[in-house]
Every structure is written in C-alpha cells, then in structure tokens.
Image (cartoon, rainbow, N blue to C red):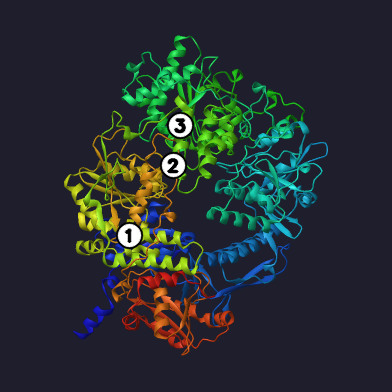
Amino acid sequence: MALQDLLKKYFTKTDSDVVFKVLPDSSGLNFILPKDEFAACKELKSNEWTQHQYMVLSMLQEEGIATEFPNGFSISSEDAVRLPEIREIFDLPPAFPGKFSIRVENRTTQSSFKVTLYLEYPNGQNTIYYELEGPYLKVGEFETYLPTPEQWAVIKSIQAHQKLPPLEKTEYNNLLLVHQLQQAKQAGASIDLSFFNKLKIINPESVSVSMRLTPNEDGVLNPSFGTEATFEKIETRLGQLTGNETVQSFKVGNEIILLDENKLAAAREIIQNRKISKSQVKDFVKTPSAFLDAALVDLDTGFSLRVKGATTFQHSYFGETDESGLNWFSNGTAGSVSCIEAGDLEKIIQDTETLEMFSKTFEDAQKHNAQEMMFLGKPIDITDVQAINEKVTAIREKIQKGEMPEVEMPVVESDDDVEQLWELDKDKSASVVVDIYKNYEILSYGSGYVAEAMGEVLYKDNLHLEDLKRQPFKHQEEGIRWLLGLSLNGLKQKQKVCGGLMADDMGLGKTYMALVGVYEFYKHLEQQNQEKKPVLVVAPLSLLENWKEEIDLTFKESPFKDVVILQSNADLKRFKIKGAGVETRQNKAAIESEDVPGNAIQYALKIGKQFAMDRLDQHQRLVLTTYQTLRDYQFSLCRIDWSFVIFDEAQNIKNPNALQTRAAKGLKSQFTLIVTGTPVENHLGDFWCLFDTAKPGLLGSYQDFRHRYIQPITKATSDKVAEVRAGVGRALREDVGALMIRRLKEDQLEGLPKKHIFVGMPSEELQNWEYSELLSSTMIGRQLAVYNGAVNGVIAAQENEYEKNPVLRGLHKLRDISLHPDLVDGGCLSLPDNEREALAYTQTAAKLETVFSLLHEIKKRQEKVILFVINKRLQRFLKLACHKILGEQVEIINGETLAVSKSPGQQTRKSIIDAFQNKIGFAVIIMSPLAAGVGLTVTGANNVIHVERHWNPAKEAQATDRVYRIGQEKDVNIYVPILHHPEMPSFDVNLHRLLSKKTNLKDAVVTPEDADLQNAGIFNTPGSEDRTIEEKYLKNMPWEHFEALVAELFARHYDAETYLTPQSNDRGCDVVVLSPKANMLIQCKHTTKHILSGEGPIRELLAAPSYYKEQIGKSFSRSIVITNAKSFSKPTRNAAQREGIELMGHTELSRMLAPSKITYSDIFKRLDKKRAG
C-alpha cells in the first residue's frame, strides 16, 4: 500500500494516461494516438492532458499549419521548430545547448567551396557527426534535440548547400549560403562565422529605381537595392549585370549584392530602359509602370530623383502615406532652394501627425540612400542621419509635454517649377495612363460642386420592381433611388456628377442595391434609345462569386447579356491577346519618341471593334474583376467606356499611392460607385482618396483637405480633441452632402429586428445601452490580488524608470487578468477533466462566472450564441469548459482559419459556420473579432457575448454585424460583461467608457481609433490588497513569473542581489545570484508535468559559468536547476551528478516559499527591473 501511495504522489492521471506519441519522418513530426483515443478527443471525452494536446493541434489545423490524418496530425519541420507552444505540451526534445562554428574550405568563387558545421558543447567538446530526422537533430545513439528556428536555419542552409552538385556551387550560391548563416546569427543563432563575420553580403527584398536628371533634363535610371552604394558607384558597376547569367553576385564597393533570377531580371529591366527623354520624364514620374515592368521592379516603395547638376539625391515618395503632407515628387530644382537642416525641423513640424509623416518619409528616403528629400514642399538635408533622429526624438518629447509653439501650418503650394513640370495634360482623350497625383497640392481636376439635398437627388418616378425576385426593403428602395438619381444626373452636361459613396452599415444589402440601381439605369437608357455600355465591378477575389450569385437571386431575367469573371483562373485567358503579358511596360520605341500617340501603347486585352465578338467591351456585359487584375491590365481597362464602375470593399483603394488606386482613378465611366461599410479605416485621408475617385474636386486638393479637416484635430489639446474631432467629422459629412449615403442599423431600418445591447455598468450618458445586473461582477481573491500586483508593478516602474513605457505593457497584463489571472504574461488555464473542475476554474475569474450564467439562460431559450474572444489560450479553455458544463461541442474560428480548404475534409470558415447554423436549438461558437471580416454571415445566431473586447470600436461593430444584418429573423441581444474593481475604475470600466464615446458619432465622418487606455489614469491609484503567492499556484504560473519568483526567493533566503537574465541568449542561465555566502547561476524549468526529464536543462547550464564570469567579473561556485516538478527522471539526476549541478524541485521550492511572503507586486516589479548580461 505504501508503494501505491508513493506512486500516487508522484504520478497523476496527467502522467499515466495515453498521450500523443510524436514520431519524426523526412517531412516533419507526426502526432499519433490510438484510433479510439483520437475519436474520444474529437468528442471531448479524453483525459485533461491529451485533450489539451488535441485542442492545440486542432487549432493549428484550422490555421493551415497542422494536417489531420485518421488518428493524428502532422506538422512540417519548418513549423515544428518555430512553435514554442508544442515543445512542452508534447514533451519534445530540448534545443541544442551549445553553439556552432564552421570550417571553410576553398574560396566562394570555386565549385569546391565547402562549409562544415561543428556542434560545440558547453564543456568545450565538439563534433561534426550528426543527422537530421525530420526536425530532430540526432547526435550519436542517445542524443536528440529539436533546434531553435535560428539553429534550424543554420543546419538546413549548410545541408542544402552540401547537396548541390559541383556545377551548381556557383559564386552566387556559395555567397548565398554565407548570407543565410549571417542572417541566422543576426536572428540569435550562436555561431562563429570566422572571417565571414566581416563580409557584407546583402540579399535585397526587392529592386526599385533611382533616377538622375542630366544637364539637358533627360532622365537616367539606375537599379536601387536599398544599400549604402551611391548612384555613381552603382552606375560604374552596371557592366557586371549585362551577361547571360540567370543569377548574379553584384559587387559594389565593400558590398556584395545577391540578385536571384527575378531581381536580376528587374535590374536588367531598368538597365535596358535607362534613358528617359526630357519630354517623357513627367510621364515616367506619373506612371513609372508605363515604362518599367511592375511585376519585376518595386514601384510601390518609391524612387530617388537626382536633381540636375547636383550630387545629392532627393526622395520622391510613392509608399503608404495616408494623411501624408509630403510632396510626392521631387521638383527637379531643389538645387536652387536652400535646404532645411535638422536643427530647423521645428519650423515645419509642430504636431504628432506631421511628425509621423516626416518619420515615414525619412525612413523611405534612407532606403534609397537619398541625401535630400522633399517634405511639405521643402527640401530637407538628411545627410546627418544621427542629427535627424535626435531632433525627431526631441520634437516628439516636446509634443508629448505640450511644449511646441502654436504655429499655424501653411497650406503647401506648388512653386512655378513644380507646376510647369507636373501640370496635368489637358487632352484627356490622348492619355490612358493612370494619374493619381492630380489634386494633391492644388486642385487641378474636378470642381467643388455639391449635389442637391438628398430629397432632391432621389429618383421620384416608378421603379421596375415587378422584374425582381426579391422586393427591396424601404431603406434599400431609398438606396436604389439615390443611386439612380445621381447616375442620371451624370448624364446631364451642365451639372455632371460622376460618382457617389454608398457607405451603408454592413449587412444592409449594398450589393443588391447596386445591382438594382444598374438595372434601373439600363432601363432609362433603353427608354432614351441610348447604348448600354458595359459595367465593371472591382472587388476582392472572395466576393466575385457572390456578385454573380446575387444576380440569379435578384432578377427574374438578368439585365446583362453575360457575366465575365476577369480573373486568371476564370475568363481572363479568353480576352488576352496571344503572347501578351501584364500591361506594365510599353515598347521602347514608343517610350523614347517625343510624342506617344494613343495607338503606340501596347494593350494586353481584346478591346475595340477589330476583335469583333471576341472583344471584352461588349455592350450590356458585366465584368467582374479584382483589384490586382485592374492594376495589371489598367491600360486596356482604362480604354473602355463603362456605364458603371463599382468598387466593392473600396477600402482597397484608400491609399492614393498604391498602383491599384492609380489605376482606379484612370477608369472612364458614366458613373463611379464607391461601396464600403468603413469609409474611414485608419485616417481621414482614406475618405479624401475615396471621394477623389468618385467625385474629383469635391473636397479640394489633399493639402486643402488636410488643412481644413485634419490639422484642427492634430492641433487640439488632449481635453478638446474628442470634441474637435466630432465637430470636424460633422462638418465633413455636411460638405459631401447627398453624394454619400450612409444608414446605420441602429436607425431601426425596415427588415431588421430589434437590437438590444446589455452592459454590466449603469450610465446616464450611454443612451443606447441597457444596464444588466447579471453582466456586472467584481473581482475578488486571487484575481484581485494579481490585478493589484500588476497595477503596483507599473506604478513602481514609472517611479523608478525601469522601462520606457510600462503603461502599455501593464495594460496588456490587466486585459489578461480581467479574463482570468492564470492568463497573465502568457500563462495557460488548466483544461478541466469534468464539470466540477470546469466550474472551479470559472469561479476564480468573476467575468467567466458571468459568461456561463448567461450561457445557461440562452440555453433555456434554445438560441444560438457567439462568444467573441481574442486570447487563444482562453479559447481552448472555453471550448472544453462548454463541453463539460453545457454538454456542447464548440468550434473556434480565428482570423487564420482557412477561407478555402487545402485538402479534402479540411474544415473552412464556411463549413464550420454552416454546421453551427444548421444545428437545431442551442449552440455555441467561439470567434475572434479579428475574424469578423469580409463575407462572414452568422444570422443563425441572435446572441453575442463580447467576452474579450477589441480596442477599436470599428472591430467590435464588425463582430456584432455578423448576426445583425439582413436575413436575421430574431431580435438580437448583445451582451457586454463588465468586471469591476472594488476600489477603482477597472480595466473593463475604462475600456467601455472610451469605446462608448467613439460609437456615439453616427452623424459624423470620424476615424475609428483604438481606445486610448494609456491616458485613462488606470495606473494613478495603487491597489491595496496584495496576496502572497501560495504553493498551489505554482502549476499554472507563467514561466516568466516562475523565474521572477525564484529570483525573489533567493534574494530573501540568501540575502543576495539577484538578477533575471535576458529572455533570449541567456546562455542557459535564468537567474544570477550574488551572495556573500555563494554566487549562483540558476536554470529555471517550469512545467505542468510532475517529472522533469531529459539532460537538456543540465547541458544548457554548463556554458553559463564562464560566460557570466566574463560578463560580470565574478566566479560562481554553485549551478542549480530548479523546477516546480515533484521529481526528476533518472537520466536527469545522473547528468546532474556527473556535471556537479544541484537539483531543486517542488519540495525545496515550497519550503523556501512559505516564510518568504512574496506578493504578486513583488513578481511584477521584479519583471520590470534591469536584467543581467
């Protein structure tokens, strides 16, 4: 009986039950269970640990990382080495504890070049004898390791090079190996590369273009690689790239630039088209894709322009610049304008928005080695990078402290030279190139005409509703009349309105309204005996089929003669001219000529009468295409006279500098319809860009827009910014008038049931929220103690300046603690084995108690519910807890869940949702609000619980809209549980207040910003209650907390100075102890298992004494491995005895813990202190 008790003490169900067996093969790791046990996991009936393993693997399968087979899963070697969560959960071998070195034979120019890898152990021994079995590194018969990602990169790079036949060991491939080893070292691999440490090898991400102007103002192009090499140095070395090689190592100065097949082709593309005549320079800057193949050359990141007669580069920006105030072109005359230097930057930068724009422009200019850049129409000298960075930091600090002078920013105007060089062509018919630059600094195209009031715009005559299979709801009929009224106005010559923005809330039927509006427009043309020109719809790939299906669902007889899906896997081949590629480069003769007639441009698609019935531009045809296809075939598509052009999910053209946006603005149509439920995603500049596509000139030039709408917000004081933003947003909404239609579901539109929003806190200010006492809970016990500890830790870090921004890190801690205290700092919840355990875990987190009380109520009503949760560790717990407590099988959908199945039987978002909605009665599904994007409709559920809220109100609204949309037949209930603190406003309370303020502006155009919790005052008041850490909390403690706890224990027990080591490259030591009694190095191993096994922890610690002696200048007499496990395996004990390393387990740890009285505040404060090493 004594033996049985002993076994029970050290071996629990977790250790003895059947668990996944892990077997390597040539492609990766296989996780295998007996078939009956695997079936039990699917039914959530296996033991805790095996169930936990299964859920981790199944979530990886949903993300496309793991592949399921009849009794298990497989994961590729590349994924296995990079997933830290699977290492401990499946008790995988440790990483190799030592470091690497290499032996090099022969030169990189020789085919006999060879690199041999040495594995060096901490004790100084080394070996070259190893083999790979899947991701496992096997040394001899008894040693097996699972390398870190960095170690794996080293091993695989050398192995791949060794397998090359001699003829393929070219200088390029040899240098590529050296570069890969250098990259692995930079990423953290411990490897001695000998003399290769000093060799500067660069493998550029892409090839962009630089240009200089000659004295006669012709342009000369050079490839740009984002390196230190100057224009002149690259120019003198271009001869290296003119051979027949398919790959190349390009030597410039002290750099070696590696060019693979695509990058070499890009460089040669630029070299072959180097000369740009004076008359063509303007066109090149406007549309570089007309001269260079955008499929090869990176034209989205910008290019450098060298001014005539100067030696510096000016940076012209083409990258992402929402709300940018920079000059998109260099004016070619900056040599005559005095440059602004670092010390004078405050003259042009006074607010955060301008500062961020400057930083982005500066970053991109550096990539192109520019020595000068244009910003807000001014040339900036950026040769002294350090001075610029220091000044930017100083300005940022002044802005944060409110010390910047109140200087009105002038509206930037183009000087005469800029106007002369970049003036738009007046003859639009001769130009088919896309020009996104109009209206940037000055209003060059369009006008500020605003349509009549909405009531006057709506089409008032009868509609042909009898031709529809589905009759419109009232709000949909209004939308159809709005669209028809505006589009018919577009046919008038005197007051031409060329477009509008349909910005209705998600789920109100925008596709339906757009199609019926086009149908009615066609009917009007028919009555007037006018031709029905084709219609173009541009949408994300996932929505093309939706548009086609909507036609069948809406019309008794289609208004279109046919529907073409202009996509590579559909109808594109039918309409491509034989031998044509993407339209990104025209013939050299046309480019170099003084004038480019329209017929000199090469088109890839069959456009025009000469193609007869094979032409794409057939009357009454609907063409469905993607934004990428529009970009690649912009010349052909811009040539067609469309009746309607519709941009669905038009946030894809919000960036004025993206190639697809340029293409969009070049299309010709009788009416352009912008369709998006989120007209402002990140910046108000999004809104300007959309309207500059729909109705150019309505909002003026971008600089006018920025001056009028953006600067008042950025210049407002922190206490006034919300008020100013709301006022500006309302003014902007009024200014666009009837050219925008936006209805929200809160307006109780016909066809939608009621929506009730219940929240766990009362407030007179929040009129749309209903207080529910059921949703209000207060943290107590350990949850309160951990919460207070986190608050106190941040306050201490602020007072002692332990870290630069402790508030942000503290907010992430409070968010996790508010869900469950075990989740803080990456901790995990134990998975319950039965209903009693599941209930016990929920009772230690007040909000989870609330959630399950609510789920019981919804189950009584036999309704369906979505739980919105971001934290994947909590998702796993809730999935199993719902099964144990409610008897429900629950699926999880994250942002990574596949939209399209890669293999038969693999679940996709659609298949998971269909199964959920088809179930009769009560059902639960867990979703991340990050997954609530395009195309997710879950109207089978009418209850939503926001367990964990996103900090951006737009994301939360999108999540709610999954159920509250056309097709929902039941009243919708939205539940927002609130966790309170007994003494101060809690994280939940602060977040709710901020989110609520940002959702009460439905009559304004505003940016849906993240809630600014950093300035909410959460860390102004210390928490009073602080509980000491008990032995029972060790199992689920995050590993970071365990290390901090050990540091605190040894500091008190030995009256010592203790330091945590860096979280990476710690050389096998987690805690350094400096004590009068003895200096110690400690390796901490936290585990949820009861036995610590393997020699890995012992080997890891062997290298620490010599390293830390060198770093700290002190010797260490004791090396200790300490763990929360109750015992050590025999191999571990033998290795420790052999190497002279002490072992301390759960018993010794508990003995030290009891009298120490360590609190959670102590843990958090320790984590924020400076680390050793």
- Callout 2: few (<14), some (14-19), or many (20+) C-alpha neighbours within 10 Å? few
* C-beta proximity under 8 Å, tags 2 and 3: no
Where does the image place residue 353, in percent across and percent down from the top left?
A: 55, 46
Task: Determine the secondary structure under disc 2.
Answer: helix
Quarter-wise, where is residue 839 in the image?
bottom left
**Which residue lies under the disc numbered 3?**
733
- Callout 3: few (<14), some (14-19), or many (20+) C-alpha neighbours within 10 Å? some
* C-beta proximity under 8 Å, tags 1 and 2: no
Q: Which of the marked residues, 2 or 3, is nearer the chain's N terminus?
A: 2
Task: Determine the secondary structure under disc 3.
Answer: helix
Where does the image place residue 382, in percent across and percent down from the top left?
A: 70, 52
In this view, the mark in front (1 or 3): 1
**Which residue lies under the disc numbered 1?**
984
Residue drawn at (21%, 85%) of the image:
2
Residue drawn at (65%, 53%) of the image:
204
Q: Is residue 443 left or right of residue 1020?
A: right
Where does the image place residue 64, in percent across and percent down from the top left?
A: 42, 52
| C-alpha span from label 1 to label 2 | 26 Å
Disc on res. 723: 2
